[in-house]
Image (spheres, grey):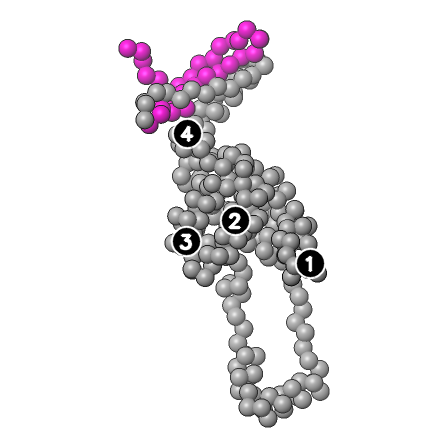
Amino acid sequence: MGKKRANGEGNIRKRKDGRWEGRYTAGHDPETGKAIYKNVLGRTQAEAKTKLKAAIEEARSLDVTKAGKYTVGVWMDEWFENYARIKVRPSSHQTYRGYIDNHIKPNIGKLPLEKLTSLELQRLYKKLLEKGRIDRTESKRQPKGLSPKTVRNIHQIIASAMKLAKEQRLITTDPTEGCALPKLEHREMKTLPVEQLTSFLREAKDSGVFEIVLCGAGHRPSEGRAAGPEVGGY
């Protein structure tokens, strides 16, 4: 009976085409028990050794039996159904589903999960800012791009899903870390001139809603509650 190689064990050989090949065991099939072999190539023996060492380290941090089976779209669905639905308010489910189905999956959904990079995400965010709005009759006169706040919300959802993917050993690095996000638009609050404000308050008092107006003016919603999706850890 042949010796069963340990996870990460590898060897280097020179191929007929002159390149050097590093071959290693990345894990074992849970159903058959057979080793899962992978390889790296280098123009020199030193290059192959360096690549082999990096590949072995990566294999130790990944669950290779699961890592290759997910696309970004499939993983976002998995994350939403089994984690987001539990973590967030039911009233937010439709918003999350809309972000995933209308913006994330059509653009990067077919990418293998482990191939998603920060550059791919930057391209996505740029595209959404420029022409991310869904074509609907009621939105014809609105800007073609999504607002910076919406793009940041979409980023938070992707970041939450990627954090979980890393914890599940499906990816080695989180592509959302270090992404450049669009700045939020700060609009100045417009106030009524004194003459108009006096007239407005007089009319409010005459119509019996003066107290409601005062309460509304004194109450401002928390910025934290309105900042974006409440994904938390995931």
Secondary structure category for the residue under label 2: helix
What is the x, y in percent for residue 44? 57, 13
Residue 41 visible, this orientation: yes
> Which quadrant of the rendered structure holds the N terminus?
top left
Q: Which mark is residue 100?
A: 2
Say left or right for 195 vs 81: right
Residue at which label 1 appears = 140
Farthest-out residue, front: 137
What is the x, y in percent for residue 118? 58, 40
| Amino acid at dot 1 | Lys
| Amino acid at dot 2 | Ile
Q: Which mark is residue 85?
A: 3
Distance from disc 4 to disc 2, alpha carbons, whole Å, reads 26 Å
Of callouts 4 and 3, the N-terminal one: 4
Badge nearest the viewer, 1 or 4:
1
Secondary structure category for the residue under label 1: loop
| Amino acid at dot 3 | Arg
Residue at which label 4 appears = 64
Secondary structure category for the residue under label 3: helix
What is the x, y in percent for residue 158? 51, 47
Distance from disc 1 to disc 2, alpha carbons, whole Å, reads 22 Å
Rendered position, 15 above or below 123: above
Of callouts 4 and 2, the N-terminal one: 4
Residue found 63% across the figure and 91% down from its top? 202
Residue found 32% across the figure and 23% down from its top? 32
